Amino acid sequence: MSAVGEVQTFRGPVAVGWLGVTLMHEHVFVGHPELDLNFPHPEWDEVASVEAAIAGLERLWDLGIRTVVDLTVLGLGRNVARVAAVAARTRIQLVAATGYYTADVLPAFFHTHGPGLLVDGPDPLVEYFVRDIEEGVAGTGVRAAVVKVVTDRAGLTPDVRRVLAAAATAHERTGVPILTHTHAASRNGRAQLAFLTDRGVSPDRLVIGHCGDSEDLDYLRELMDAGATIGMDRFGMEHVLPDDRRVGTVVELLRRGYAESMVLSHDAAFFSRVTPPSWRAQHAPHWHAENISRRIVPMLLAAGVTDADLHQLLVLNPARLLTPGRSKKEEP
Ligand SMILES: [Zn+2]
């Protein structure tokens, strides 16, 4: 296990105090291994994409960002060896994630492997998540420091419940936090929070993601009042909600005293097959990892947000969440 007050990164453990300004929900590369193998995306070039990610992360460093959590897990084309090649050449501290991204069903393998299934045995999801956290990912030695799970439009389908349950078990064994994707329009962070807390996860170890897509203050406050942190983590996704409205929600929640219960990020990617660079350039020009530093922080400051609030959102909350432990109350 990690020493007390240490967080695992692509380049090994770092003291929590060294995390600095942290983006909690980003992606370096999002792909689809089987499609990529058979039908490579015309905009993907391995060498150029790695160089672009390194250059982009270096620009983030120059803007004051110190740590970026890469929430690319299984189902999104996770390739930790490729990201490690990036991590080795940037000053930014990258954090790896384990978990599974599915909105509805898992691949067939998981329908034949697990308790009571054709190939009977323990749930491989639990084994994979715990191995990623305790030993490292796919022989790279890079250890995951967070678990990521997904609830989307379809809600808590049987396979989504299975992933969430496996994440709760991995959290129980390792203490790493759980960071999520939700479909904010369905307000399904509620059901996600209830499901995970029913399985023993303390809400203060959870970040309910994509809450910034919502302007329903009652919904957002309900999650935070229950003890969870919410991810205002899609700045620049103006095709879903314009940034000025995302900023308005953060400002109002800060005014109501929720500075300790929010984190900020973009859910951007240096390359994503789902929304390739040419599409982003045309339809979502602000959707990149520099947006918070370049546009959102100035908008927040202009709206009266204090430097202390920004430090809370961008430094203190990520550090508290990334510190391994089963609950705030248990820590010394
Ligand atoms: Zn994401």
Image (tube, helix red, strand yellow):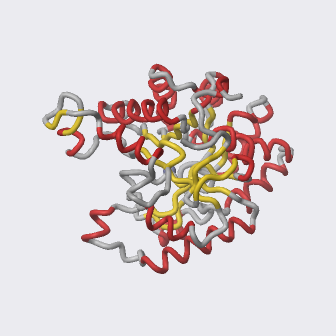
Instruction: Give the camera-side residue of 249 and 191.
Output: 191
Give the quadrant of the C terminus: top right
Q: Residue furthest top?
A: 198
**Vertical placement of 282 versus 227: above or below?**
below
The image shows residue 153, relative to residue 58, as above or below, that is above
Residue that protrudes farthest toward the left in the picture? 118
Give whichever of 328, 143 is nearer the camera. 143
Identified at 54% across, 34% down, the residue is 175
Q: Where is residue 176 shown, x and y percent of the image?
A: 54, 38
* Residue closer to the observer: 205 or 176: 176
Residue 303 x, y percent position in the rendering: 83, 46
Q: Can residue 151 be seen in this view?
A: yes
Q: Which residue is drawn at 23% across and 29% down?
A: 115
Residue 118, given in percent of the width and then of the height, sits at 13, 35
Q: Taking 62 as reference, is 225 above or below it?
A: above
Residue at 78% across / 53% down in the picture? 299
Count every numbered label the image shows and give the total.
0
- Image quarter of residue 323: top right
Q: Is residue 305 left or right of residue 267?
A: right
Relative image position of residue 36 (x, y in whole percent)? 32, 68
Q: Quadrant of residue 316?
A: top right
Q: Is residue 253 visible?
A: no
In the picture, which quadrant includes the N terminus? top right
Residue sitting at x 39%, y 45%: 100
Instruction: Work out whether 163 lies above or below 293.
Output: above
- Residue 210's quadrant in the figure? top right
| Side of 96 relative to 250 (left or right) | left
